[in-house]
Image (tube, rainbow, N blue to C red):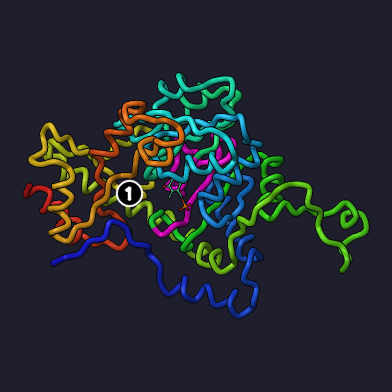
Amino acid sequence: MRKIQIAEPTLGEEEWLAVKEPIESGWLTQGPKVQAFEKEFSAEHNISHALATTSCTTALHLALAGMGVGPGDEVIVPAFTWIATANAVVYCGAKPVFCDIDLATFNMCPNDLKSKITDKTKVIIPVHLFGLFADMDAIKEIAGDILILEDAACAAGASYNGKYAGEIGNAAAFSFHPRKSITTGEGGMVTTNDSALYETMSILRNHGASVSAEVRHVGAKPYLLPEFNHLGFNHRMSDVQAAIGLVQIKKMRGFIEERNKWAAYYKDKLSSIDWLNTPHTPDGCLHAYQAFVCYVDESKSPMPRNQIMEYLQENGIYTRPGTHAVHMLGYYKENYGMKPEDCPNARDADQYSMAIPLHNKMAQEDYDYVIEKLLAL
Ligand SMILES: *Cc1c(COP(=O)(O)O)cnc(C)c1O
């Protein structure tokens, strides 16, 4: 029987060879490879500044800290996202405020966003879920002077009317976890066109260290350490990871092109299944298809979603819910008194969404096999 994973990273000989250099040179932590990776990444995303981090979670944390988010502030996040989006807000001592989503795109609903803004709202975090941009024109108009941090964990290489994540909002955070479009094992990146925010984030990424006034004046001396005027973190990426990232970033466009080809194939071949809503891509969006997430309409489906997922697994096809409704998870339910009906679309997406396999290790026969099993239901 075939075994088709929901996601698989695509790494090979080039990545294997790339890690040789940092290992042989002994420069393992943030160094020349990180700098080169940041340069390539920002060039690919048409942005002035990029900072590599240990993950997207720390990238989000770094950006929020850099924006000055703290106790007493509110940050609006969509309720249907990976838990890290909300957790990063809590790390800063601020309050996450959950906004509902649109079921057609699984992204932040602009109308609901409007109703969640208060005079405490400091930042809005639209998530480009599964590699599809949120409705940024509408969100930006509603936001006015409120800062926007794009959670682009799934959206490396994705675009919106020709713009990349970080170009519309004040900053964007990306992930290189193996389930995302390109990977460095663990890893992340913050991008921004705001030079002042970039400077602050560079300092906070490295324990709050900045070049001392004395060094600036007399030059480096063996006895002079940096200045530490801020509470910073260690969110630095290693040069070993960046060496892998440098290879992966060159493959990114090809990966996305291939994913789009197979997504179109799925959409065409599965269009006769009236209970399965395949992903909708609004005009002007280049979808990165980090995942191919469908919505099961149980009023028409032959069996409930969970049973469909079990049937597929019995046939060697691994599926997952798109992601979870964060406002329904124990920590947020307990500490923020959230109820499922507070964000009904996020609740439904949690219950009825289903990601089917789509990744760069799959071949024609794999796609045909998934299609055959779904059509047989
Ligand atoms: C994966 C993901 C994250 C977290 O990324 P890490 O690199 O694993 O920390 C955050 N937000 C979203 C939307 C994600 O999909």
Q: Quadrant of the N terminus?
A: bottom left
Q: Position of residue 348 (x, y in %)?
A: 27, 33
Q: Position of residue 152 (x, y in %)?
A: 47, 44
**What residue do we see at 55% from left, 38% from top?**
167
Residue 286 in sight here: no
What is the quadrant of residue 144 in the picture? top right
Q: Within 10 angstroms of label 1, few (less than 14), some, or many (20 or more) residues? A: many
Disc 1 residue: CB within 8 Å of ligand 1: no
Q: Which residues are magenta?
A: 151-178
**What residue do we see at 64% from left, 57% from top?**
234
Task: State the count of labels.
Answer: 1
What is the quadrant of residue 364 in the picture? bottom left
Determine whether 2 is above or below 150 in the image.
below
Residue 160 highlighted magenta (yes or no): yes
Residue located farthest toward the front when viewing the structure as drawn: 334
Residue 147 highlighted magenta (yes or no): no
Residue located farthest toward the right when viewing the structure as drawn: 218
Secondary structure character of the magenta stretch overall: loop
What is the quadrant of residue 29 in the picture? bottom right
Type of amino acid at the residue the image marks with label 1? Ala
Residue 207 in sight here: yes
Determine whether 198 is above or below 366 in the image.
above
* In the foreground, 22 or 58: 58
**What residue do we see at 62% from left, 71% from top?**
28
**Label 1, on which residue?**
291
